[in-house]
Amino acid sequence: MTGCPRAGRWIGGCSFEARHDRIPPEPTVDPVLGFPFYVSTMEIEARTKRIYVRDVCTRCGKTIERGGK
C-alpha cells in the first residue's frame, strides 16, 4: 500500500478507532445444583475482558499497531 491520499488533512483526513479483542468470562457454577450459569447479560458484559490490539483508520484502513516491549 502506498501513502494515504488523506494523510495530513485536517478535514477529511484519517479517523482512527481503537480495536479490541474480547474475552468472555467463564460461567459461574451453582454450588447447590452444580451446573454453570450466568445471572444476566449485563453481568457477562461487565466481566468481559477487553484487550487493546490496534488503531484502524475508518476511512483508508491504515493501522497503528500496539507498542511492543
Image: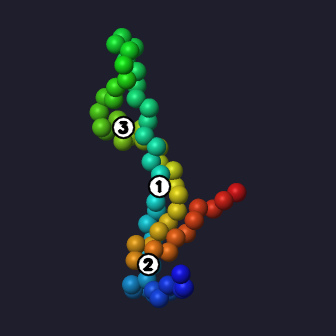
Amino acid on which disc 2 is placed = Cys
Q: Please name the residue shown 35% across and 35% down the image.
A: 43
Residue 37, compared with residue 57, is above or below; it is above
Residues at discs 2 and 3 in contact (Cβ within 8 Å): no
Q: Residue 12 appears in which quarter of the rendering?
A: bottom left
Question: Label 3: which residue?
Answer: 44
The Cα–Cα distance between marks 2 and 3, rounded to whole angstroms, is 33 Å
Q: Position of residue 28 (x, y in %)?
A: 40, 25
Count of labels shown? Answer: 3
Image point (45%, 74%), residue name = 61
Numbered disc in front, either 2 or 3: 2
- Residue 20 is tagged as 1
- The residue at the point 30 percent across, 37 percent down is 41
Q: Quadrant of residue 2?
A: bottom right
Q: Compared to 51, does 13 lie above or below?
A: below
Residue drawn at x 33%, y 29% is 38
Q: Amino acid at mark 3?
A: Ile
Give the mark nearest the N terminus, 2 or 1.
1
